[in-house]
Image: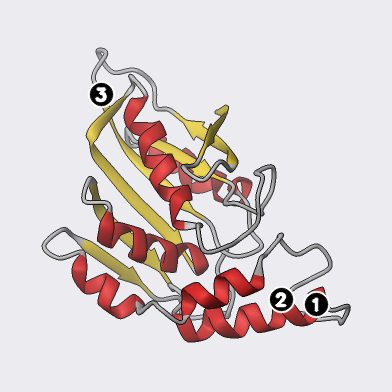
Amino acid sequence: MESVRFTTYDGVELAANLYLPEKLNGEWSPGIIVCHGFGSCKENHADFADIATQQGFAVLIPDLRGHGKSGGEVDANIFNDVAAALQYVQARPEVNPTSIALRGSSMGGWLALHTGAHLKDISPVVAYCPANEASMLLLMEEVGFVQRGHESPGIGDNPPRVNVNSMLQLLYRLDVAKAARRINPRPLLLGRCGHGEVVH
């Protein structure tokens, strides 16, 4: 595992872990970008990265803005995180720049669907239990409640940094179902979890 950093188009520095498979005759590896859920971090997806590298994939897992060791705060520019991750991994000499998949869960699934709709270099797109705008709006309301000094068991003691007003303005303009349809004809896999309400 290699710890890396790169900067988004709006100037936020992101920390990420890059996992590379063992070299096979110097050939390029297909890549996967992983987007974690709200309040999660890159380390929570290390097990997936280990399995994927054993299958020959290079895996990049950033801490999304406002999370972990990355700068900034969760705001309306969060889609730039995936665009910067794509640019970074495509520039790596070990990775095939024309074979990059995107995998996200929960808020990361919502992020994967929206960015996958616009970043045509990404294929396939995989979203596990993706959030929708309604659930994201409820989450932002809860975050705002905590920011005003109240307690919330759903958010926890150490929530990510969030610009609630910026996110609310973004969410009212979006429709994740329409974004998912725009991914066609590229492959899209949607997964649903049978137990539990939180996907990291």
Real-space Cα separation, disc 2 to disc 3, in angstroms: 42 Å
Q: Quick check: 69 left or right of 180?
A: right
Compared to 141, does 6 lie above or below? above
* Residues tagged 2 and 3 counted as in contact (Cβ below 8 A): no
Q: Which mark is residue 135?
A: none
User: Could you say whether the residue bearing mark 3 is in a helix, strand or loop?
Assistant: loop
Which-is-in-front pick, marks 1 and 3?
A: 1
Q: Position of residue 84 (x, y in %)?
A: 43, 41
Q: Is residue 5 above or below residue 38?
A: above
**Which kind of residue does numbered mark 1 sit on?**
Val
Count residues near mark 1 (Cα–Cα under 10 Å), then give few for <14, some for 14-19, many for 20+. Answer: some
Q: Residue at x 49, y 32 (%)?
A: 18
- Name the image quarter holding residue 146: bottom right
Residue 96 in the image, given as x and y percentages of width and height = 25, 29
| Marks 1 and 2 close (CB-CB < 8 Å) | yes
Q: How much space separates mark 1 and mark 2, taking CA atoms?
A: 5 Å
Q: Nearer the viewer, residue 50 or 40?
A: 40
The label number, if any, that marks residue 143 in the structure image: 2
Instruction: Left or right? Give the position of 15 relative to 9.
Output: right
Looking at the image, the residue that sits furthest to the right is: 149
- The quarter of the rendered structure image containing the N terminus is top right
Q: Quadrant of the C terminus?
A: bottom right
Q: Amino acid at mark 2?
A: Val
Q: Which residue is mark 3?
A: 28
x 52%, y 76%: residue: 169
Which is nearer the N-term, disc 1 or disc 3?
Answer: 3
Name the residue tied to disc 1. Answer: 146
Do we see residue 54 in this rendering? no
**Number of on-image labels:** 3
Residue 135's spot in the image, x, y percent?
Answer: 53, 83
